Image: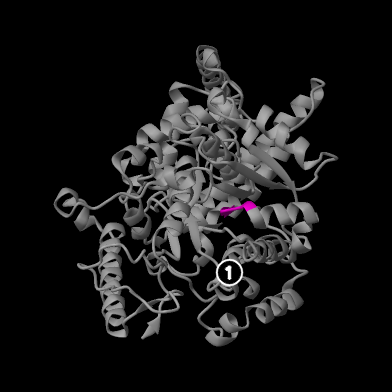
Amino acid sequence: MFHYETLIETPPCSTDLSSSPLRCNNDDNNQTRLDFTYLQELLLSQKQQNQQQASNNDKIITKSSTLLSNRHEFDIKYLNIIDFYRNKTILITGATGFIGKVLLEKFLRIGVLDRIYVLLRSKHNKTPYERLQELLNQSPCFQFNRQQLNFDKVFAIDGDITQKDLGLSFEDHRLLIQQVNIVIHSAASVQFKGNLRIFIEQNVFGTDNIMRLCTEMINLKSVVYVSTAYSNCNLSMIEEKIYPINYTIPYAYVNDNIDEFIDDIMWKYGNIWPKSGHQALWGRPNCYTFSKALAELLLVKKYGNKLPYVICRPSIVTHSVAEPTFGWCDTKNGVSGAMILGGLGIARTMILNGKCNADVIPVDYVVNGLIVVAAHTAIVPVEQRKQVVHLTSGERNPITWGELLNRSRECVATKPFLKQIRPLAKKPETINTYYGRLSHQMTKIFSHYCFALVADGLAMITGNKPFLLNITKRMHLGFDTLEPFTNNEWQFRSQNYLDIFYQLSPHEQEIFRSDIGQIDWMKYVDNATLGTRRYLLKEDDSTIDQAIQRQKFINWAYGSGEALAYLGIFGTIWWQIFSEHIEQM
């Protein structure tokens, strides 16, 4: 006989168990006992049932594009994203950034979370609470759908990712480890140039500090680290997996002793400003991409067995498709900066290969992807989690740099910017040949810098503040930063997110729209260019007619000026020839 009270809740002996392998027998001590043979049968039966249930769960969760076409035949259930987030608590870092704002707005609009904690540090003599209020009340991102947003669910947490223990107070630390269920870490230094030490402190040590806090959270369901698709741009084809920093480094040293490796880098290169090609970057064009690769490796090696994590790698994040509104953007870096400078007539040339893929992805597609993969990581069994997910466009729905910038130019030609100062440049061409680069340098000198000097000189004469030369210098610094990405292309494998996305119901696929294959790029670029006009240049649509008239005048004046200049040059040459002919007579 075998005592079973500690293994299973025993039913009352009066219950009819004739059809059950359990048989109840009361001894003199009124202790419930179970025959050992029947116990073996029971455990075997339960084990078989559990295996069958696990098999069924695998069928429910596992999905591929083949299964999608046979959904009704196999009766596959959907992941329920909104139900997962219901009454959960989330911690967001980087909420004041481009992605972070849209992410916070989306969570507020969904409205099912219990609480949203936003990690902010004091800045410009403003407390985290004041910064959060300023963000929610002044950023246009939170004005388009304001009636749908419940700001009572958002709370500022005073912290700094670069500080030990995030600089949290005892109360805030206890609050986070007890309440938080999901963490989305998107805070980072996104500038491409600077001291390597700064990038490692913010992007690598900052990630280390966040993950250390996550290991203490008692109700943690998932952690999302927002990296970049270009973290391994030293390779031409990048799969959804973790790579060593460089294949020339001993594999065990880099991976098994990641802290030692980071300390070695800080000691050797921490105080320098490495440029593209420097050995400190291990084949990457800038400190940003290198630090992101290092942070990924640190996360996997130090916390891979401790946290339910997923690494998301978006490519070049640009204007929204529809959320919070069409064409929204609040950063002048990257694609939006090129649209502004080209649309104003300032930029006449930049180094690019018009045939290379511009792997851009809308910010709302990135945000929806982050929300979906966070839920997926928490819902599915451990063995079915995705370690790395690419949020990219090139493999599924490519667009080239030439197509993107040409379409933007066409849009500006019909709906110009009111602040335009000279005619639009000709259509972008490939400038990676010898003659192309020579033409680029000549245009850069005469049409950029000389024009800026003349314009600023006229501004000073008329009592206005000169500005164009400074803008031109900053423009070329930005173009130099973009050159590795506009003059090359990469193949990013992106099957993981597609597999996850099509586990959603059709209804939630609409709520969390993020299938890049559904985008019409030409319509998207039109909306993005108009969004640049509205939200970055602050020009209302009512000024379009005025801008058209201004553009016509600029084109006429510039054309007339060029005609007079050419006439003067040819007139001078002709007069010299004619004068010599008269003297000879």
Up-down relation of residue 301 to residue 569 (above or below): below
In the shown orientation, is residue 84 left or right of residue 255?
left
Quadrant including the C terminus: top right
Q: Which residue is mark 1?
A: 299
Image x and y of residue 228, in percent: 52, 58
Q: Residue furthest right?
A: 125
**Colour scheme used in the picture?**
one colour
Q: Nearer the viewer, residue 448 or 82?
A: 82
Up-down relation of residue 200 to residue 487 (above or below): below
Give the magenta range: 179-184
* Structural crowding at the residue carrying mark 1, measured as other residues with C-alpha within 10 Å and reported as few (<14), some (14–19) or many (≥20): many
Residue positioned 65% across, 73% down in the render: 280
Quadrant including the N terminus: bottom left
Q: Nearer the viewer, residue 400 or 427?
A: 400
For the question of whether residue 139 can be seen, the reply is yes
Q: Nearer the viewer, residue 242 or 119?
A: 119
Image x and y of residue 200, in percent: 69, 65
Q: Is residue 18 magenta?
A: no
In the shown orientation, is residue 138 left or right of residue 486?
right
Q: Secondary structure at mark 1?
A: helix
What is the quadrant of residue 115 in the picture?
top right
Residue positioned 75% across, 71% down in the render: 270
Q: Nearer the viewer, residue 140 or 217?
A: 217
Image x and y of residue 580, in percent: 59, 33
For the question of whether residue 519 can be seen, the reply is no
Residue positioned 53% across, 43% down in the render: 87
Image x and y of residue 86, in percent: 49, 43
Name the residue type under label 1. Leu
Q: Is residue 182 magenta?
A: yes
